[in-house]
Every structure is written in structure tokens, then in C-alpha cells.
Amino acid sequence: MNWLDYVVLLGTILGIAAYGVWRTRGRRDLNTYLKGAGDTNWLVIGLSVMATQASAITFLSTPGQGYESGLGFVQNYFGAPFALIIISVVFLPIYRRLKVFTAYEYLGQRFDTKTRLLGAALFLLPRGLGAGITIYAPAIVLSTVMGWRLDVTIICSGLVAIVYTVAGGSDAVSHTQKYQLAIIFAGMAAAFIILLVRLRADMTLTDAFTVAGGFHKLEAVDFSLSADKRYTFWSGLLGGMFLALSYFGADQSQVQRYISGGSLRESRMGLMFNAICKIPMQFFILLLGSLMFVFYALQQTPPVFFNQTAWNLAVSKDSSGELRTLERKFTVAHTQQRAAIRRWIAATHSGDPATAAAWRAAAMAAGARTEAVRDDAKKALTAAHVGTTGSDADYVFITFVLQQLPHGLIGLLVAVFFAAALSAKSAELNALASTTTVDLYRHLVAKAADDAHYVAASRCFTIFWGLAAIGFALFANLVENLIQAVNILGSIFYGVVLALFLVAFFLRRVGGTAIFWAAIAAQLLVFVLYFKLGISYLWYNIIGCAACMLLAVVLQAALGPTLRPEETA
Amino acid sequence: MDLDPNPLDVHAPEDNTPPIDAPGAASGVMPGGTPEPPDDVTGLPGLRTWASVYLLVGVVFVVYVILLTTLSRVFA
């Protein structure tokens, strides 16, 4: 990055944050601070919901997912449209009718205090951890690649989010997310166009798709019934639907974004906007990764390992010369692969299918050798203990950005990563603070204070959770692939959280004691199964939800009919 | 500040908010008496009910799956 990139980066990020503070100056009452001005239109709601979910992990890690594994990850989002419809029909009207600040307030009204506290705790724990990952993930990648200090990167980005979220609450989050998303879309579109231009220097777009398809990078839909495969149509539709139901319907970081609509119609339209746009958005990000695979397959000297900082450090420590040997092997295999791909495309253009098929097979064989060398290189790196897990998927896109984009656009793309991190982080902090204020502090500690007191408390809790997330990020270790880590963490807890709400809505005879103990038992069951079974993590959403609901019914049957509060008077 | 003496008491009703199935809550009239604006109109041209909007979302999903499957098959 040069001075122009830093001007673009800092101007964009700090400018949006400053706008958020200025735009929401003077917010004093609790309702506005936690839920916004109450006049938010559907587009702002829709963009806010989208920005809250799409953190920096989406834009840093997902292209790498496409590079390594192709388009299959898009199936993870197949359940989202149906989940959003269910939320629009069932959850949203109830939240708006009761004018709740948090989703867990509703649990208190339907069941009792301990169930409300359990729901809040099941949100606060994973979301608190998730907030740390949200800030850690882009920081580790950017600091590694740019040479920035990791702790400074984490602290600076965390503090920016804390400042405007504390200042303006929910409104500040929504207003800044609009512009952050605009930056994100502009940056990603620019990167996509540059990639297509670079590819066109070597081949047509159809050729690029042919090569990507030949290397299985375009297999988007897998109708297999195997429970072991991580991403299939069925795990995405069913498991993904339960994950999305819980995330969008019971996670306060999302609930807070759409209950602020000017009317039920505006909130619903915002959700339907996401129902339609989510899948194509994820598709294009994954496609970027798949086409980057083709781009690097035709490069003269692509990196054997995209985390070049870790690679160069390991090479400097490698007295046996093993890594240099692997580099040479990789270059040989890659050269053979590149030559085979060019001949494959030439034969296709000349209308010789038999020759094209033969060169395709040769390219695939060379590709397999290339991947084998990369696997050996990753194992050698892990053994060298240079601070990497051996996966470089999260570094593919940032490497492309730094090496292929012109100055100015580099700054814009780095701004994309920070904008995405800030948009998700600010929404998470806002939600964590709201739940802590409303479900814990106001409910248990200070029951009769005025609005100014609760707004001040909410500001303090925002700072607390922001600092906690920064603290967690400073001590976190990199996991294999960040986007999968976030989804796995969610899947372990979200099933039970969803069950709390489904029982509340549909199983009227189940009371607070039964659902409380059922939830605890089901959550323990999910923990045990996660470490015992090797199934796709998406299934744990269904397992946790079903187990909790079933146990609740059984426990209630054992306890006898529950008495409603008005029946005991 | 008073702490709730029995925060985990199963029979302790929540503060002053009416239960979910109280007549006021079910009828759409807010506890403060302000009626929620009518919401059965979507305001979209050609999609007057929410059922039609949800159906459109379902159809769009099917189109996405068909396009993605076709992409997979064509370039396999």
C-alpha cells in the first residue's frame, strides 16, 4: 500500500464513523437508543440485516473458500429464504406487538424469569465470543500481510466501532451500515472486474468457466444424501434453515436491526429483501474465489502458500532445505498444469473434442500433483511452528488484492474489509449491550430508574463488551477457516435458542420449568455429540432444536399441567 | 436498588407487561392503547398480499437452484 491507499482507507473508515456520531447526536431516550427512531424504511433495514451478517470474515475468507472448494458453500444459505419467511409471519408480529427491546423479554413474558435469563445467556456467551472473532479475523490477516502490528490493528478497529456505537446506539449502527455496505459492494465489484480483465488477457470468460468446471470449482449444488458431507442441498436447506431461523429470529444482533422498522410492513420488506439477495451475494463472492483459482493456475509463479509472511519465515528457519525443494516441485507441477490447460483450451477452440479431453485429463493430473505438493508444504509449515495452522484460504483474496489491483483500489478493498468488520461489530456490540441492559441490569438490578439512567448504562455496557471483544481478540488463535469457525460456533448454540422460541410460539402447554431444564439437557447433548460424531455441523441446529422441544414436552408431561399467572390469583 | 429476591422462581410473573395471550396483546391493540397500522397491504404492484410475496420468494429460490444446478452441469 502507498500513501493513496492509506488516504482512501482512513478517509473512508473514519469518515463513515464520524458521520455516524454526527448524525445521531443528542439521542437520549432508551427507546430511540436501543431501537432507533422508529421510522426506518425497508431498504435501510434490509441493508442493515445484510451488513450485520456479512462481516469481514465473509469477504476475506469466502473467496478463499471458493478457491479451495468451489461453489458448494453457497448451499449453506439455501435455508435462509424460508427461515426469513417464517420469521416474517410468526416472530416479527409478536416482537412488534409486545414492543420488546430484546427477543428474550418475550421469553420472560411467555415463560418466566429463569428462562428469559437462560435465553439471554445463550445469546451473550457465543455472541460475545463471536464479537472477538469478528474483530480478530480481519486483523490477523491484514497485519500478517501488511506488516502492521496485530495488537494495534485489533485495538484501533475495535475502538472505532465502540466510539460511534456508544455515541449513537442503534441508529448510528443503521446509518453507518448503509455507507459501509456501499463501500463493500463498490470494492468487491471493482475486484471482480479487475479479475475478469486479467483473465481475458489469457482466455475468454467461457474458457475460464470451462477450466473452473473441469477442476470441480463450479459444483454449486450437491443432492447427495450423505450426512458426512459438510455442504449438500439437504443440509443447507434443512440445517441451514434452522440455523437461519435461530440467527435471524432469536439472535438479538439481528432482531434489533429489524424491530426498528417504521411499520410491520417495512420490517417485513427488509427481511424479504435479504431472502432474495442473500444467495446471489454469496454466489458472487464464491465465484470470485473459483475464478481466482483459474487466474492463479495460469500465473507464471503463483505462491505455493498464500500466507507469504509465514512461508518466508519458515524458509529462513529451514536448515534442511525441505521447503525450497517443495517450492521447486510445486513450480514444476504448476508449469505442467499451466501448459496442459492452455493446450486443452486450444483444442476446444479448434473443435477437437478428443484432444481436448486428453489435455483436460493431463491438466487434472498435473493439478492433483500440484495440490499434493501444496499439502506437503502445509504439513511442513505446521511442523515448523511459525504461527500458522497450515491453511492459507484466508490469504488468497488479500494476496490477489495487493498484487493485482492498482493503488487506490487497494486502499478501497482494505477499507472493504474494515467496513465489513465494523458494520458487524457495531451491531453485535449494540445487541450485547441491549440484552445486558434490558434482560439483566434493568430486570434484576435497577428496576425503576429513568431513561437517562438506562441509556447511560447501555453506553457503559457497550464499552464493556467492546473492550471484552478486543481482549478476547488479543488472545485468540487463528482457526482453520474463519467463516466455518463462526458457523460451527453458531450451530452448537443456535438450535437450543431456537427451540426456546418455537416452544413459546407453538407449544402452549409447556411452561418455564420444563423448557428451562430441557434446554440445558439439550445443550449438553449437542456438546457431547459434536465431539463424538463427524457429521456436518449444520445438522446440530436441527438436533439441538428437536431434542430441546421433545424433552420439553416429556418434562411437562411429567410435571403436570402448568398454571398461568392469572390462574394463580 | 432492589434485587429480585427470587430471580429463578418459576411462579414469579414478569414485571408489569401483560402476558402474551392477554386480550390486549392478541387484538393488536398495544398496552398503551395505540393501534398498530393495518399491515395486510404490501404496497407492491401486482403483489397485494403477503402470501404472494412469500410465494415469489419461493419461486425465486427455485430459479436460483435451477440456475446453479445448470451451471454445475454445463461446465462439469
Image (cartoon, coloured by chain):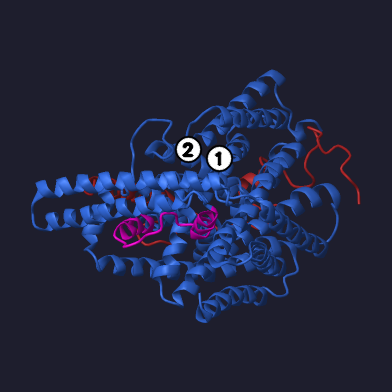
Question: Does residue A268 sit above or below A517 in this rendering?
Answer: below
Q: Are marks 2 and 1 in contact (CB under 8 Å)?
A: yes
At which x and y percent is residue A558? 69, 18
Q: Tag 1: residue type?
A: Ser
Q: The magenta stretch spans which residues?
A: A288-317
Q: Is residue A292 magenta?
A: yes
Chain letter, colour red in render: B
Mark 1 residue element: helix
Q: Earlier in the sequence, mark 2 or mark 1?
A: 2
Q: Spatial distance from mark 2 to mark 1, Cα to Cα? A: 9 Å
Q: Looking at the image, which is closer to me, A8 or A31? A: A8
Q: Horizontally, is A2 left or right of A227 in the view?
A: right
Chain assigned blue: A
Q: Residue at coordinates 51% horizontally, 68% vertically from top-left?
A: A414
Q: Does residue A354 appear in this view?
A: yes
As displayed, is residue B76 above or below residue A282? above
| Disc 2 target residue | A239
Q: Is residue A18 above or below residue B54?
A: below
Residue type at numbered disc 2: Gly
Figure check: A354 above or below A434: above
In the visual, does A293 lie left or right of A568?
Answer: left
